[in-house]
Amino acid sequence: MRERRDTRADRIAAFAAVLGAFGVTLGAFGAHALADRLSPEASAWWHTATLYLLVHAAAGLGAAGTGRARCSSALLLGGAALFSATLYAMALGAPRWLGMVTPLGGLGMIAGWVGVAWGLVRPADTRDGGHG
């Protein structure tokens, strides 16, 4: 019988995989079901949201597996989820003021990338047990 692991890295990787699945699903939905219903601006938002979601799902999956940058991978994923969710919502007709929230997701992604870089180059003796 296989023992079930429940580590923080596994949970982050699972969240990354779920975001990847959402990215593929929502990308296909936008390309097929919404192709004739979205304005050019809304279509561009949808495309951007899908691109960022997929790229950061893959990046978060990789970063979670390093054992050095798990907190940063959570920032990458949370930022991508917030960024993409606000763009998807606006593309579907949510109020435009929601666009003021979108940059917060962008800041999360930027902080995540900086944290991943720092987690990979900082000296080994400053790593907090691989949970940085």
Image (cartoon, rainbow, N blue to C red):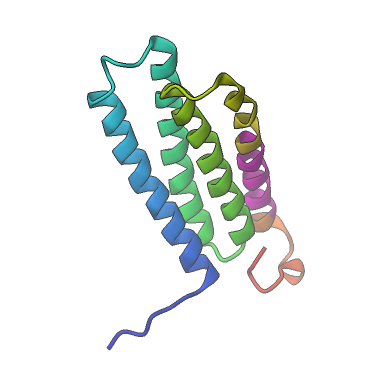
- Of 122 and 131, nearer the camera is 131
Residue 102 place in picture, x, y as percent: 60, 30
- Inspect this view and state whether residue 65 appears: no
Q: Residue furthest left?
A: 32
- Of 86 and 67, nearer the camera is 86
Q: Is residue 67 above or below residue 35?
A: below
Q: How many marks?
A: 0
Q: Is residue 3 above or below residue 29?
A: below
Q: Residue furthest right?
A: 126
Q: Residue furthest top?
A: 40
Quadrant in which the C terminus appears: bottom right
Residue 13 place in picture, x, y as percent: 45, 60
Instruction: Kindly identify the residue that appears in the image at 22 percent across and 25 percent down.
Output: 32
Residue 86 place in picture, x, y as percent: 52, 32
Magenta-span inclusion, residue 129: no
Magenta-span inclusion, residue 108: yes
- Of 53 and 96, nearer the camera is 96
Q: Which residues are magenta?
A: 106-118
Residue 130 place in picture, x, y as percent: 63, 69
Instruction: Kindly identify the residue that appears in the image at 72 percent across and 59 percent down.
Output: 122
Q: For this view, does 4 lie left or right of residue 11?
A: left
Quadrant in which the N terminus appears: bottom left
Q: Is residue 59 above or below residue 3?
A: above
- Inspect this view and state whether residue 99 appears: yes
Instruction: Kindly identify the residue that appears in the image at 27 percent across and 25 percent down.
Output: 31
Secondary structure mainly formed by the magenta segment: helix
